[in-house]
Image (cartoon, rainbow, N blue to C red):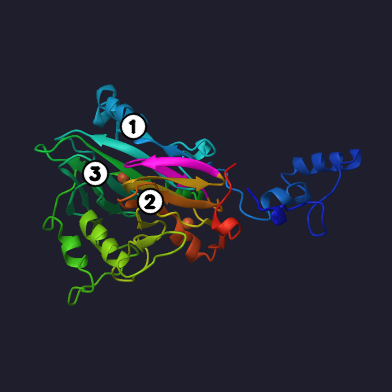
Amino acid sequence: MNKPHENHREDVVGRANVEDTPELLQYYKELEQFSAGALWTVANKIEPWEPKSQSVPVVWRYKDLREHVLRSVDLVSAEKAGRRVIYLNNPGRTDVSAAVGWLYAGLQVMNAGEVATAHRHSASAIRFIMEGQGAYTVVDGHKMTLGENDFVLTPNGTWHEHGVEASGTHCIWQDGLDIPFVNAMEANFFEVHPDLSEPVTYPVDDMTRTWGNAGLTPGGGKWEKGYSPMFKYEWEPTYDALIKYASSTDGSPYDGVLMEYVNPVTNGPVMQTMGASMQLLRAGEHTKAHRHTGSYLYHVAKGQGHSIINGKRFDWSERDIFCVPSWAWHEHVNDAATDDACLFCLSDLPVMRAFSLYREQSFGENNGHQPLV
Ligand SMILES: [Fe+2]
Ligand SMILES: [Fe+2]
């Protein structure tokens, strides 16, 4: 949806605008034989005036998917499937199995007492816990216990193993990985741990206890890896921080009260290719529309409302997941009269920022709100 003055035309000076002639068509054929082509036949497509995402806005409703996710437990064993996951397949990105842009996402289920084979890969990952008790992840010997709305990192190259304690319940979580991005870079390796399992060699939850204390850093603590040493970010301190921040800010007109999860050593993103944030929308809050580069996968951690994406309304409630493709107009609404809503967001912003590809624009017109199409 472009605003009227942004209807970019291709029949202007500076853009390719060559009409086919029999001679030119013959010429293009000849070039093809040498694995070559004339740029002006593709220039406007490969260099659009502005980003043209192939991803389409989608909301994946938990009430539609939950039963199907649970059914996978009876249909395939954890050993046979490797990982029992129902992935989110954006209709515009089925060729790369992405949920949006270059981000992959899926819903994984594990029964009490199950453990997945330890492995590592070049792709980085997060898990965001949706339901159940007793889930844990081991990353390079550090075991993290996980509860609802907690998220855990399994960065590029780290050995990791997921499981649910025998005393727990079945657990469902959202996986989020940069698999499509790493594949686009043609740099993806995958290894199964030689022992199929990895030992826990540190005290349970040590990384969050060491690095996750607001305003404090461990004396003599050293960390030089490209990802956060705080492997687990818990829901309670996150929500608490949002409430405190909300009491002293109006927040952003576009995002409400938003906090980014950070690597406590650098104050930068939690991993080099993917970042995450949690935003709070106050009761009845309706943000203004803007758009920016980057791909965004929202997970409704709390509450209910709707978002308008490129002029179309998408209703959401707790545990639903929806995406905002790059350069899509978007605004969010908390539909509740008294309760706040919280949106967890996984994105490729660190990539956008690292390569100076981030751009942002506000909608402006119509008091900042998109007309519904
Ligand atoms: Fe993995
Ligand atoms: Fe935004």
Q: Amino acid at mark 3?
A: Ala
Measured from the top left, where is residue 113 in percent x and y?
Answer: 14, 35
Instruction: Give yes or no for contact between labels 2 and 3 (Cβ–Cβ under 8 Å).
Output: no
What residue did someone put label 1 on?
A: 63
x 48%, y 64%: residue: 353
- Highlighted magenta segment, given as a residue range: 312-325
Mark 1 burial class by Cα count in 10 Å: few <14, some 14-19, many 20+: few
Seen at 36% across and 57% down, the residue is: 277
Q: Is residue 327 visible?
A: yes
The answer to which quarter of the image holds residue 276 is bottom left
Question: In terms of secondary structure, where does tag 1 sit?
Answer: helix
Q: Earlier in the sequence, mark 2 or mark 1?
A: 1
Seen as rendered, the residue at the extreme front is 337
Q: Is residue 326 magenta?
A: no
- Residue type highlighted by circle 2: Ser
Task: Spot the residue most to the top.
Answer: 75
Q: Can you say which quadrant of the picture contains the C terminus? A: top right
Which residue, given by chain and number where applicable, does mark 3 sit on?
A: 118
In the image, residue 172 lies at what x, y percent? Answer: 26, 38
In primary-sequence order, the first of circles 1 and 3 is 1
Circle 2 sits in a helix, a strand or a loop, which is it? Answer: loop
Secondary structure under the numbered disc 3 in the rendered image: loop
Tell me, yes or no, whether the two marked residues, 2 and 1, touch with CB atoms within 8 Å. no
Q: Residue sitting at 69 percent across and 48 percent down?
A: 45
Question: Is-magenta flag for residue 317?
Answer: yes
Q: Which residue is mark 2?
A: 122
Q: CA distance from mark 2 to mark 3?
A: 14 Å
